[in-house]
Image: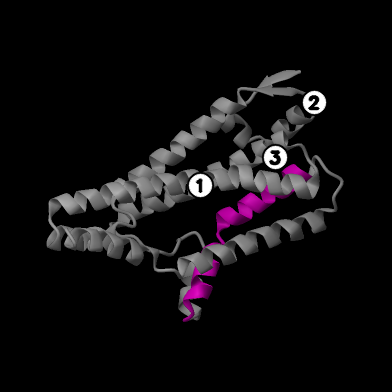
Amino acid sequence: MVFDFRFWRYFANQQELIGNLGSGTMRGFKNRVWMVGFFGLVLYVAQEMWGINTHHITPLYAFGGADPYTLARLSSLVGIILWAVLYMSFHFFGIAFLLNRITKIELSRLAVLQLYVVGILLLEKALLWLTFMMTGFTTHISLFSFGPLAAAVFEDTFLVFFFNQLTIFSALIIALQVRFIHAFTDMNPRKLLVILLFIHIVMALITASVGLLPLEDWFAQYIERGVFNE
Protein backbone atom coordinates (compact mmCIF):
# COMPACT_ATOMS: atom_id res chain seq x y z
CA MET A 1 0.00 0.00 0.00
CA VAL A 2 1.22 3.48 -0.90
CA PHE A 3 0.01 6.43 1.17
CA ASP A 4 0.58 10.19 0.94
CA PHE A 5 2.22 11.80 3.93
CA ARG A 6 0.17 14.74 5.22
CA PHE A 7 1.81 16.61 8.08
CA TRP A 8 -1.25 18.16 9.73
CA ARG A 9 -3.52 15.20 9.10
CA TYR A 10 -1.23 12.75 10.85
CA PHE A 11 -0.24 15.28 13.52
CA ALA A 12 -3.68 14.76 15.02
CA ASN A 13 -3.86 11.04 14.15
CA GLN A 14 -0.55 9.44 15.06
CA GLN A 15 -2.01 5.96 15.37
CA GLU A 16 -3.09 5.97 11.73
CA LEU A 17 0.38 7.16 10.73
CA ILE A 18 2.02 4.37 12.73
CA GLY A 19 -0.24 1.82 11.11
CA ASN A 20 0.48 3.13 7.60
CA LEU A 21 4.23 3.17 8.22
CA GLY A 22 4.07 -0.43 9.39
CA SER A 23 2.17 -1.73 6.39
CA GLY A 24 2.73 0.67 3.50
CA THR A 25 5.11 2.85 1.53
CA MET A 26 5.12 6.56 2.15
CA ARG A 27 5.40 9.26 -0.49
CA GLY A 28 5.52 13.03 -0.31
CA PHE A 29 7.64 13.07 2.86
CA LYS A 30 10.52 15.13 1.46
CA ASN A 31 8.17 17.92 0.45
CA ARG A 32 6.89 18.12 4.02
CA VAL A 33 10.44 18.21 5.35
CA TRP A 34 11.14 21.25 3.17
CA MET A 35 7.84 22.78 4.29
CA VAL A 36 8.72 22.49 7.99
CA GLY A 37 12.28 23.70 7.33
CA PHE A 38 11.02 26.74 5.41
CA PHE A 39 8.54 27.57 8.17
CA GLY A 40 11.35 27.31 10.73
CA LEU A 41 13.60 29.68 8.78
CA VAL A 42 10.77 32.19 8.30
CA LEU A 43 9.99 32.03 12.03
CA TYR A 44 13.59 32.63 13.09
CA VAL A 45 14.07 35.45 10.57
CA ALA A 46 10.78 37.10 11.59
CA GLN A 47 11.78 36.96 15.27
CA GLU A 48 15.15 38.46 14.42
CA MET A 49 13.59 41.28 12.39
CA TRP A 50 11.13 41.94 15.23
CA GLY A 51 14.09 42.41 17.55
CA ILE A 52 14.39 39.26 19.67
CA ASN A 53 17.98 38.86 20.92
CA THR A 54 19.19 42.03 19.16
CA HIS A 55 19.23 44.41 22.14
CA HIS A 56 22.98 43.89 22.55
CA ILE A 57 23.71 45.71 19.28
CA THR A 58 21.38 48.66 19.89
CA PRO A 59 24.18 50.84 21.42
CA LEU A 60 25.97 50.67 18.06
CA TYR A 61 23.27 52.86 16.56
CA ALA A 62 23.97 55.59 19.13
CA PHE A 63 27.76 55.43 19.14
CA GLY A 64 28.68 53.96 15.76
CA GLY A 65 26.04 55.34 13.45
CA ALA A 66 23.50 53.84 11.09
CA ASP A 67 25.92 51.99 8.79
CA PRO A 68 27.70 49.93 11.50
CA TYR A 69 24.33 49.20 13.09
CA THR A 70 22.98 47.94 9.75
CA LEU A 71 26.07 45.77 9.30
CA ALA A 72 25.62 44.37 12.80
CA ARG A 73 21.94 43.58 12.12
CA LEU A 74 22.85 41.82 8.88
CA SER A 75 25.56 39.82 10.65
CA SER A 76 23.09 38.90 13.38
CA LEU A 77 20.55 37.85 10.74
CA VAL A 78 23.07 35.59 9.00
CA GLY A 79 23.99 34.11 12.35
CA ILE A 80 20.37 33.35 13.28
CA ILE A 81 19.79 31.68 9.89
CA LEU A 82 22.81 29.45 10.43
CA TRP A 83 21.64 28.67 13.97
CA ALA A 84 18.14 27.82 12.72
CA VAL A 85 19.56 25.36 10.17
CA LEU A 86 21.84 23.81 12.79
CA TYR A 87 19.06 23.58 15.39
CA MET A 88 16.53 21.95 13.08
CA SER A 89 19.12 19.64 11.52
CA PHE A 90 20.26 18.42 14.92
CA HIS A 91 16.77 17.55 16.11
CA PHE A 92 15.82 16.03 12.75
CA PHE A 93 18.94 14.17 11.61
CA GLY A 94 21.02 13.96 14.78
CA ILE A 95 18.41 12.67 17.20
CA ALA A 96 16.92 10.34 14.56
CA PHE A 97 20.38 8.81 14.04
CA LEU A 98 20.93 8.47 17.80
CA LEU A 99 17.57 6.75 18.27
CA ASN A 100 18.37 4.50 15.33
CA ARG A 101 21.57 3.36 17.07
CA ILE A 102 19.67 2.70 20.31
CA THR A 103 16.45 1.11 19.06
CA LYS A 104 17.55 -0.33 15.67
CA ILE A 105 14.37 1.07 14.11
CA GLU A 106 14.65 2.08 10.47
CA LEU A 107 16.05 5.58 10.11
CA SER A 108 13.29 6.54 7.66
CA ARG A 109 10.61 5.87 10.30
CA LEU A 110 12.50 7.77 12.98
CA ALA A 111 12.89 10.69 10.57
CA VAL A 112 9.09 10.91 10.43
CA LEU A 113 8.96 11.00 14.22
CA GLN A 114 11.62 13.69 14.48
CA LEU A 115 9.93 15.82 11.84
CA TYR A 116 7.00 16.09 14.23
CA VAL A 117 9.40 16.83 17.08
CA VAL A 118 10.85 19.73 15.09
CA GLY A 119 7.32 20.88 14.30
CA ILE A 120 6.37 20.88 18.00
CA LEU A 121 9.53 22.80 18.93
CA LEU A 122 8.80 25.42 16.26
CA LEU A 123 5.19 25.64 17.42
CA GLU A 124 6.43 26.34 20.95
CA LYS A 125 8.69 29.12 19.69
CA ALA A 126 5.87 30.60 17.60
CA LEU A 127 3.47 30.66 20.56
CA LEU A 128 6.11 32.21 22.80
CA TRP A 129 6.83 34.89 20.19
CA LEU A 130 3.11 35.59 19.87
CA THR A 131 2.99 36.10 23.64
CA PHE A 132 5.92 38.51 23.43
CA MET A 133 4.22 40.52 20.69
CA MET A 134 1.00 40.74 22.70
CA THR A 135 2.77 41.85 25.89
CA GLY A 136 5.40 44.05 24.24
CA PHE A 137 8.44 42.62 26.02
CA THR A 138 10.67 39.54 25.89
CA THR A 139 12.33 37.33 28.50
CA HIS A 140 15.03 34.67 28.46
CA ILE A 141 12.65 32.36 30.34
CA SER A 142 9.92 30.42 28.56
CA LEU A 143 6.42 30.84 29.95
CA PHE A 144 5.76 27.19 29.06
CA SER A 145 8.62 25.87 31.18
CA PHE A 146 9.60 25.40 34.81
CA GLY A 147 11.96 28.37 34.35
CA PRO A 148 9.72 30.97 36.03
CA LEU A 149 9.20 28.68 39.02
CA ALA A 150 12.93 27.93 39.21
CA ALA A 151 13.71 31.67 39.08
CA ALA A 152 11.43 32.18 42.09
CA VAL A 153 13.05 29.36 44.08
CA PHE A 154 16.71 29.30 43.02
CA GLU A 155 19.26 32.06 42.68
CA ASP A 156 21.63 29.95 40.61
CA THR A 157 21.45 30.96 36.92
CA PHE A 158 22.43 27.50 35.72
CA LEU A 159 19.48 25.87 37.49
CA VAL A 160 17.10 28.46 36.06
CA PHE A 161 18.41 27.82 32.54
CA PHE A 162 18.20 24.07 33.09
CA PHE A 163 14.58 24.08 34.24
CA ASN A 164 13.81 26.52 31.45
CA GLN A 165 14.48 23.67 28.99
CA LEU A 166 11.89 21.46 30.67
CA THR A 167 8.57 22.55 29.19
CA ILE A 168 5.10 21.18 28.63
CA PHE A 169 6.14 20.74 25.01
CA SER A 170 9.08 18.59 26.14
CA ALA A 171 6.61 16.32 27.92
CA LEU A 172 4.50 16.16 24.76
CA ILE A 173 7.56 15.26 22.70
CA ILE A 174 8.62 12.49 25.09
CA ALA A 175 5.09 11.04 25.11
CA LEU A 176 5.06 11.10 21.30
CA GLN A 177 8.48 9.47 21.07
CA VAL A 178 7.58 6.72 23.56
CA ARG A 179 4.36 5.88 21.73
CA PHE A 180 5.93 5.97 18.28
CA ILE A 181 9.09 4.00 19.11
CA HIS A 182 7.22 1.41 21.18
CA ALA A 183 5.09 0.60 18.12
CA PHE A 184 8.17 -0.53 16.18
CA THR A 185 10.26 -2.22 18.85
CA ASP A 186 9.93 -4.76 21.66
CA MET A 187 11.91 -2.59 24.06
CA ASN A 188 10.41 -2.32 27.53
CA PRO A 189 8.38 0.92 27.73
CA ARG A 190 9.90 1.86 31.09
CA LYS A 191 13.41 1.36 29.76
CA LEU A 192 12.53 3.39 26.69
CA LEU A 193 11.11 6.18 28.85
CA VAL A 194 14.27 6.27 30.98
CA ILE A 195 16.46 6.47 27.86
CA LEU A 196 14.43 9.32 26.38
CA LEU A 197 14.36 11.20 29.69
CA PHE A 198 18.13 10.82 29.92
CA ILE A 199 18.59 12.21 26.39
CA HIS A 200 16.36 15.21 27.11
CA ILE A 201 18.05 15.90 30.46
CA VAL A 202 21.51 15.78 28.86
CA MET A 203 20.39 18.18 26.14
CA ALA A 204 18.92 20.48 28.79
CA LEU A 205 22.21 20.42 30.72
CA ILE A 206 24.21 21.24 27.59
CA THR A 207 21.84 24.05 26.62
CA ALA A 208 21.94 25.48 30.13
CA SER A 209 25.75 25.40 30.10
CA VAL A 210 25.88 27.19 26.74
CA GLY A 211 23.36 29.71 28.06
CA LEU A 212 25.88 30.79 30.70
CA LEU A 213 28.34 31.85 28.01
CA PRO A 214 28.10 35.60 27.24
CA LEU A 215 27.67 34.96 23.50
CA GLU A 216 25.65 38.12 22.92
CA ASP A 217 28.27 40.27 24.67
CA TRP A 218 31.06 38.62 22.68
CA PHE A 219 29.24 39.35 19.45
CA ALA A 220 28.61 42.97 20.43
CA GLN A 221 32.26 43.46 21.45
CA TYR A 222 33.44 41.92 18.18
CA ILE A 223 31.25 44.31 16.17
CA GLU A 224 32.25 47.29 18.30
CA ARG A 225 35.96 46.59 17.79
CA GLY A 226 35.37 46.49 14.07
CA VAL A 227 33.44 49.77 14.17
CA PHE A 228 35.69 51.82 16.38
CA ASN A 229 38.93 50.55 14.82
CA GLU A 230 37.95 51.93 11.43
> Residue 129 or 74: which is nearer the viewer?
74
The local crowd at label 3, few if under 14, some if 14 to 19, many if 20 or more residues have their Cα within 10 Å, is many
Quadrant including the C terminus = bottom left
For marks 2 and 1 on the same chain, the one whose residue lies earlier in the sequence: 2
- Label 1, on which residue? 86
CA gap, disc 1 and disc 3: 19 Å
CA gap, disc 3 and disc 2: 16 Å
Residue range corresponding to the magenta coloring = 155-181
Amino acid type assigned to the residue bearing label 1 in the image:
Leu
Dot 3 and dot 2 residues touching (CB under 8 Å): no
Task: Nearest to the eye among marks 3 and 2: give it.
Answer: 3
> Residue 142 or 214: which is nearer the viewer?
214
Residue 102 higher or lower than 4, as above or below = below
- Where residue 199 sits: x, y (%)? 67, 58
Dot 2 and dot 1 residues touching (CB under 8 Å): no
Q: Which element is circle 2 on? A: helix
Left or right, 219 with respect to 63, comes to right
Whether residue 146 appears in this view of the structure is no
The local crowd at label 1, few if under 14, some if 14 to 19, many if 20 or more residues have their Cα within 10 Å, is few
Amino acid type assigned to the residue bearing label 2 in the image:
Ser
For marks 3 and 2 on the same chain, the one whose residue lies earlier in the sequence: 2
Q: Which element is circle 3 on? A: helix
- Label 3, on which residue? 110
Amino acid type assigned to the residue bearing label 3 in the image:
Leu
SS majority, magenta: helix
Query: Which residue is pictured at 57% across the width and 47% down the height?
Result: 90
